[in-house]
Image (cartoon, coloured by chain):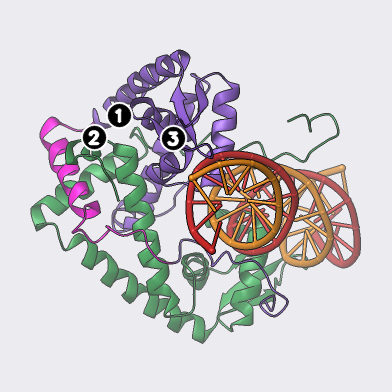
Chain colours: A green, B purple, C orange, D red
Amino acid sequence: MDTRSAEEIRADLSYLFDKASQALAARMADSLATLRISPRDYCVLSKAGSAALTQGELAELALMDKTTMVVTLDRLEGDGLARRTPSPTDRRARIVETTDAGYSTVAQARTVIDNLYADVLGVLPAEQREVFLDALVTLVGPDGPLSEVEATPNAPRRRATRSSRTQ
Amino acid sequence: MDTRSAEEIRADLSYLFDKASQALAARMADSLATLRISPRDYCVLSKAGSAALTQGELAELALMDKTTMVVTLDRLEGDGLARRTPSPTDRRARIVETTDAGYSTVAQARTVIDNLYADVLGVLPAEQREVFLDALVTLVGPDGPLSEVEATPNAPRRRATRSSRTQ
DNA sequence: TATTGTTATACTCTATAACTATA
DNA sequence: TATAGTTATAGAGTATAACAATA
């Protein structure tokens, strides 16, 4: 797979983070697939459960676009895990509620995820595990060098006009 | 940004890895943009430099599709950083060479990346830094729980036939 | 006029299929 | 027949624009 030496790989922080992130995401998706939901479904469902939020509020909380939320809720509602109820105070808005089946799925998902994290972090001795997590929180936390996700997520994503379609 | 408590965030391994990976990728892209290249450009350019590889070999080494390599090399060649030369032994194949400008850019990029990594890891005390990197290598390494990227990268990505276009 | 949720659609990214020229 | 590189394009994901109903 990788023809580089162990030292070279250890020095490649981007590779280490990317691989860790992707591999864990893949295992997470596989695990949650047994419950017929995606990681995003879990994210939305678990956040919707407690509070009575509108779609827009939920989208903001889950850091996704409102149009992506529409698609996600369409599927969750179709699968009987969530429900859209008209807001009593604003006839434009719709409150997202988790169904009983949804609560059950979220509970099972929590167990699945806990087991996954335990399995992954279990390979590290307890002491090293704590140091590792502390370091990760330091890097990613509000004052850390990996705090911001800002800038250049992809490309401008602007709609093409006749004049901008130069490339 | 994140309304969760510090403990909740510390317990969310997916979030920590995703944010670390994305934030570092963003900083990397920003840094390399000053040299007018993308992270992928650097990856290809640095691997092409030493050996005299064909496009296909280079694509395999860089873990990308040969069609993606074509697009990448089109741009690198257009920018005068790489060159395609006919293979002396196989008239179908083309050897990828790094130009003098390409070598210069790679050298500058290495410095930029080294500085970035030093800046990021510099927030950790030396001892913690070593424990952290050891742990990361353990998790991601060949015998670790985050070794494989396998399975379900996205969706099947098969061309639609009349019968499969059910969804 | 501004905002909520929806629909339609455009843009990026990446990979599959088909093609040309060799082997 | 099989393979290297190319081109065309499909598929997935996600965001922008426009719209209807309501504030």
Amino acid found under the numbered disc labelled 3? Thr
- Please state if D11 lies on the left or on the right of D17 as rendered: left
- Please state if D16 lies on the left or on the right of B59 as rendered: right
Have a look at marks 2 and 3 and say if they share a chain: no
Q: Mark 1 lies on which chain?
A: B
Number of disc labels: 3
- Please state if B48 lies on the left or on the right of B84 as rendered: left
| Secondary element type, mark 1 | helix
**Residue B99 in magenta?**
no
User: Circle 3 sits on which residue?
Assistant: B89
Q: Which chain carries label 3?
A: B
Give residue D2's position: percent from left, percent from top.
49, 59
Residue at position x 18%, y 41% in the image: A6
| Secondary element type, mark 3 | loop
User: Circle 2 sits on which residue?
Assistant: A11
Amino acid found under the numbered disc labelled 2? Ala
**Residue B131 in magenta?**
yes
Have a look at marks 1 and 2 and say if they share a chain: no
